[in-house]
């Protein structure tokens, strides 16, 4: 397996003192998902495990996308327990040869969790009532504040640029809101194409927490928009997160593309939020097209806008804006532009 271990195990300790083992196994990817979590009877736990691992990979200098890692855990943590997260991240890295613990005959043990794995941050750990005799686990937080500390490197979050943009999420009820999409990018080190051939842009984009169809749509939109952006392909590893992952439609796409452009330094950051709605069947040409639900979305944007916000709308809406809408938005201290294309490269 190209010098990688076939299997690795990292233990963790739950609040009640139980010791669980997280196991990671590497095999050729063969067009399968990059991460698979086998947790019988707990599919939600498997989804959270895959999400943590994929986000933590964003901070790695090199990542071989030709392999699949299958993760498993030999027990079910209690509701809300998260100490296993750091163990899953480390087992994944050990199996792929991305990190090795100090030499020992026993599997390493780690306790830790994070709300920002894509930044390499380890927020803390839940201390158990007592540790098993002779066990000296790696503790997230004070013991391991960030993943770079594993190898004596700087905080990997310093190399990650993360930006949020907002889009109107309209369902016709009290749940209407401005939802956010966040794009976090870190530079590839330039060796991937030398070692593995040309980089597949969509393989460098992780979209945890959404279904397969949504992942394909997000990857396709970003890859197309970057193609239009000139020399943007093959340069970034990307994680995309949605504040509300359960929705339908494609009106988020312009906000997604703009968050990516802002994260990569390709557009100017507004004083407040960037609020955008629009889609495209031709992001590779930079085109911005109209979406459904215009009047409801305009009303929602006007109600939620604050001073300093910048609103981007499809050019096709320009002559159909309600009378006084622009003036009312300006009175709130926000600005608006109707665009046919994303920024020129």
Image: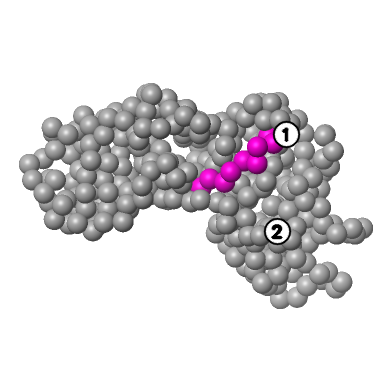
Residue 153, labelled with which disc?
Answer: 2
- Left or right? Give the position of 84 relative to 160: right
Q: Nearer the viewer, residue 131 or 321?
A: 321
Categorize mark 2 by other alpha carbons within 10 Å: few (<14), some (14-19), many (20+).
few
Mark 2 touches mark 1? (CB < 8 Å): no
- Describe the element under mark 1 as helix, strand or loop: strand
- Left or right? Give the position of 228 relative to 139: left
Q: Nearer the viewer, residue 158 or 32?
A: 158
Dividing the image into 4 quarters, which one contains the N terminus? top right
- Residue 119: name its quadrant: bottom right
Q: Position of residue 11 (x, y in %)?
A: 78, 58
Q: Nearer the viewer, residue 212 or 252?
A: 252
Query: Residue at coordinates 57% horizontally, 37% vertically from top-left?
Result: 235
- Left or right? Give the position of 241 relative to 75: left
The residue wearing badge 1 is 67
- Describe the element under mark 2 as helix, strand or loop: loop
Q: Which residues are magenta?
A: 184-192
Query: Residue at coordinates 66% horizontally, 72% vertically from top-left?
Result: 142
Q: Position of residue 164 (x, y in %)?
A: 41, 50
Q: Residue furthest toward the right? A: 105
Between disc 2 and disc 1, the foreground one is 2
């Amino acid at each position: 397996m190209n010098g990688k271990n076939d299997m690795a195990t990292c233990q963790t300790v739950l609040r009640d003192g139980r010791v669980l083992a997280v196991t990671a196994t590497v095999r050729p990817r063969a067009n399968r998902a990059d991460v698979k979590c086998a947790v019988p009877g707990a599919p939600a736990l498997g989804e959270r495990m895959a999400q943590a691992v994929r986000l933590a990979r964003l901070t790695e200098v090199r990542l071989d996308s030709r392999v699949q890692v299958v993760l498993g855990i030999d027990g079910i943590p209690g509701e809300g327990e998260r100490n296993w997260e750091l163990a899953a991240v480390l087992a994944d890295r050990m199996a792929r040869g991305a990190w090795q613990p100090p030499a020992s005959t026993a599997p390493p043990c780690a306790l830790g969790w994070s709300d920002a794995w894509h930044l390499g941050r380890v927020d803390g750990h839940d201390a158990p009532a007592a540790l098993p005799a002779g066990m000296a686990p790696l503790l997230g937080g004070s013991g391991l504040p960030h993943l770079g500390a594993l190898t004596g490197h700087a905080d990997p979050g310093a190399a990650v640029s993360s930006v949020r943009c907002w889009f109107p999420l309209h369902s016709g009820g009290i749940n209407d809101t401005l939802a956010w999409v966040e794009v976090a990018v870190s530079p590839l080190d330039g060796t991937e194409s030398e070692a593995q051939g040309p980089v597949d842009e969509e393989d460098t984009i992780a979209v945890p927490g959404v279904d397969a169809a949504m992942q394909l749509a997000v990857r396709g939109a970003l890859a197309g928009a970057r193609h239009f952006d000139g020399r943007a392909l093959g340069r970034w590893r990307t994680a995309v997160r949605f504040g509300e992952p359960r929705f339908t439609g494609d009106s988020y796409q312009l906000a997604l593309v703009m968050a990516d452009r802002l994260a990569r330094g390709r557009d100017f950051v507004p004083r407040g939020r960037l609020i955008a709605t629009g889609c495209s069947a031709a992001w590779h040409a930079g085109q911005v097209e109209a979406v459904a639900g215009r009047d409801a979305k305009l009303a929602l944007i006007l109600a939620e806008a604050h001073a300093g916000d910048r609103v981007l709308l499809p050019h096709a809406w320009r002559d159909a804006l309600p009378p006084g809408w622009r003036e009312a938005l300006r009175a709130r201290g926000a600005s608006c532009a109707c665009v046919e294309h994303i920024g020129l490269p």
